[in-house]
């Protein structure tokens, strides 16, 4: 069976950036920043993105392109001993499970985004009851819009790499950038925006020593770059052999952190604009409102306070959120789909719809037990599974994958890579420092 392939560097960068640029950036990052000291969190996130997330991203891209296969087969094929092959299989299956469970909670949040996107349209046409239903928490709404979102994701993935993932990433990502820039300009011109900008850009350095802030920044860096679960390994397997991997990896990391930074430029000032309009933005403990309440209560209240203009701004904001969600979800669904297609010999269309149905069932279980399961699934996948799987991928790249094979793979895209800074630093860094730093950062949250 001939594997798909990205037709151009731009196609890969937009697709990989689309995977990275999702609700993790435009929802997760600003809410984490609001909750964890604003500028202090921003600074720690940028440091960890390049110190730990970029080396781990490169491990996935190199393994993916060298093996041209799904996560399980890829890790097993670079291992020589039976123990390493077993560890590769378990790590690969762990990544597939983590990607699937992330998609279970992700589809619920993305469904909310679609519902909130349609709410201004309903009010514009005078359908007040429908508008209220779209924004009120209910099992029917959650299940219906989760199913709608997963159907959109399945349709893109079933079309394949070039005609599905690449084609839609090239359409959606430029739209995301234009919408994000326009909304930032609009919000920064409103009263109160400068106070939010100060909270976001002027750090209190004493907060940077907070272990919880560091752990959350690490989790955010791995979640927003889609690391540890095999999405970047799979995308790496679709990259052309003549591409310069360290360069495209750096471009993806820069794009991802850039969009996260811009999302904060939109959301943090918007919180203080909402305060100017009489919206309560501080919780009972004196901290800024974050999490789902920020996106689904504070910002809609801000849009309502803008009058007629708020309908257009609110619609544009949730279109932005929906686009971000789709570009990420297609990469997550590709992880179990690639494995199923390559190991079971199932057609891509059949595999995609069957796995999409399985994810919906999982999502429905979470929706029906929301209070007990939602936060638990988010924590287990993004704060535990992703960093720990990232450690395993670094171990495979640094200790198990043959060093000469890595060099040969990199030389295909850059004949002089051996003399460059990347090759002098990365192999040692990913072997010793990266796993140790991830484990230490992860562990200090417990002490």
Image (cartoon, rainbow, N blue to C red):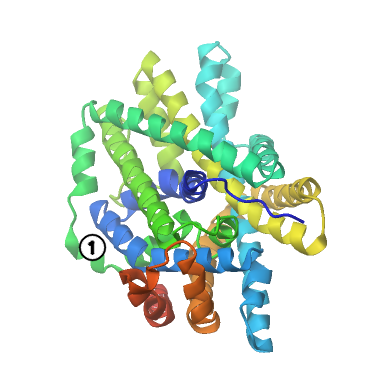
Between 46 and 363, the one lying in front of the other is: 46
Regarding residue 261, the answer to whether it shows in the image is yes
Regarding residue 289, the answer to whether it shows in the image is no
The answer to whether residue 277 is above or below residue 93 is above
| Outermost residue to the front | 415
- Measuring 34% from the left and 47% from the top, which residue is drawn there? 258
Between 251 and 113, the one lying in front of the other is: 251
The answer to whether residue 17 is above or below residue 174 is below
Residue 88 figure quarter = bottom right
Relative horizontal placement of residue 118, taking residue 270 as reference (left or right): right
Binning the other alpha carbons within 10 Å of mark 1 as few (below 14), some (14 to 19) or many (20 upward) gives some
Relative horizontal placement of residue 350, taking residue 339 as reference (left or right): right
Q: Position of residue 420 (x, y in %)?
A: 32, 70
- The quadrant of the rendering that contains the C terminus is bottom left
Relative horizontal placement of residue 69, taking residue 253 as reference (left or right): right
Q: Position of residue 161 (x, y in %)?
A: 64, 47
- Measuring 67% from the left and 35% from the top, which residue is drawn there? 148
- Measuring 27% from the left and 51% from the top, which residue is drawn there? 38
Q: Position of residue 146 (x, y in %)?
A: 65, 40
The answer to whether residue 194 is above or below residue 22 is above
- Measuring 24% from the left and 26% from the top, which residue is drawn there? 190
Residue 56 figure quarter = bottom left
- The quadrant of the rendering that contains the N terminus is bottom right
**Element type at mark 1:** helix
Q: Position of residue 10 (x, y in %)?
A: 47, 44
Tag 1 residue: 207
């Amino acid at each position: 069976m001939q594997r798909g392939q990205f037709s151009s560097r731009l196609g890969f960068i937009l697709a990989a950036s689309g995977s990275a640029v999702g609700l993790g950036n435009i929802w997760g990052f600003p809410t984490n920043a609001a909750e964890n000291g604003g500028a202090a969190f921003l600074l720690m996130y940028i440091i960890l993105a390049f110190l730990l997330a970029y080396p781990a991203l490169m491990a996935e891209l190199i393994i993916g392109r060298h093996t041209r296969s799904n996560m399980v087969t890829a890790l097993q094929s670079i291992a020589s001993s039976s123990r390493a092959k077993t560890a590769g299989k378990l790590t690969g299956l762990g990544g597939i499970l983590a990607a699937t469970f992330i998609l279970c909670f992700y589809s619920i949040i993305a469904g909310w985004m679609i519902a909130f996107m349609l709410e201004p349209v309903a009010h514009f046409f005078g359908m007040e009851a429908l508008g209220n239903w779209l924004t009120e928490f209910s099992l029917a709404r959650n299940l219906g819009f989760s199913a709608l979102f997963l159907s959109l994701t399945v349709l893109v993935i079933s079309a394949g790499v070039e005609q599905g993932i690449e084609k839609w990433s090239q359409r959606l990502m430029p739209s995301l950038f234009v919408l994000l820039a326009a909304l930032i300009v609009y919000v920064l011109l409103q009263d109160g925006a400068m106070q939010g900008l100060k909270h976001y850009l002027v750090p209190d350095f004493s907060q940077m020593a907070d272990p919880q802030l560091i752990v959350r920044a690490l989790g955010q860096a791995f979640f927003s770059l889609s690391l540890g679960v095999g999405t970047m390994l799979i995308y790496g397997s679709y990259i052309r052999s003549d591409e310069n991997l360290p360069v495209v990896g750096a471009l993806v990391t820069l794009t991802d952190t850039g969009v996260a930074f811009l999302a904060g430029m939109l959301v943090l000032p918007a919180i203080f604009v909402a305060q100017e309009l009489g919206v309560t933005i501080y919780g009972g403990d004196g901290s800024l409102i974050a999490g789902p309440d920020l996106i689904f209560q504070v910002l809609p209240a801000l849009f309502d306070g803008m009058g007629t203009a708020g309908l257009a701004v609110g619609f544009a904001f949730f279109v932005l959120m929906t686009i971000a969600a789709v570009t990420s979800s297609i990469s997550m669904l590709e992880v179990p789909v690639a494995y199923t297609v390559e190991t079971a010999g199932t057609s891509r269309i059949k595999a995609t719809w069957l796995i999409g149905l399985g994810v919906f069932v999982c999502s429905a279980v979470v929706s029906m037990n929301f209070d007990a399961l939602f936060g638990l699934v988010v924590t287990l996948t993004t704060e535990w599974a992703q960093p720990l799987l990232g450690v395993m991928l670094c171990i495979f790249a640094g200790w198990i994958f043959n060093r000469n094979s890595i060099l040969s793979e990199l030389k295909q895209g850059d004949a002089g890579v051996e003399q460059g800074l990347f090759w002098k630093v990365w192999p040692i860094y990913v072997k010793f420092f990266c796993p140790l730093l991830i484990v230490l950062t992860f562990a200090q949250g417990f002490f």
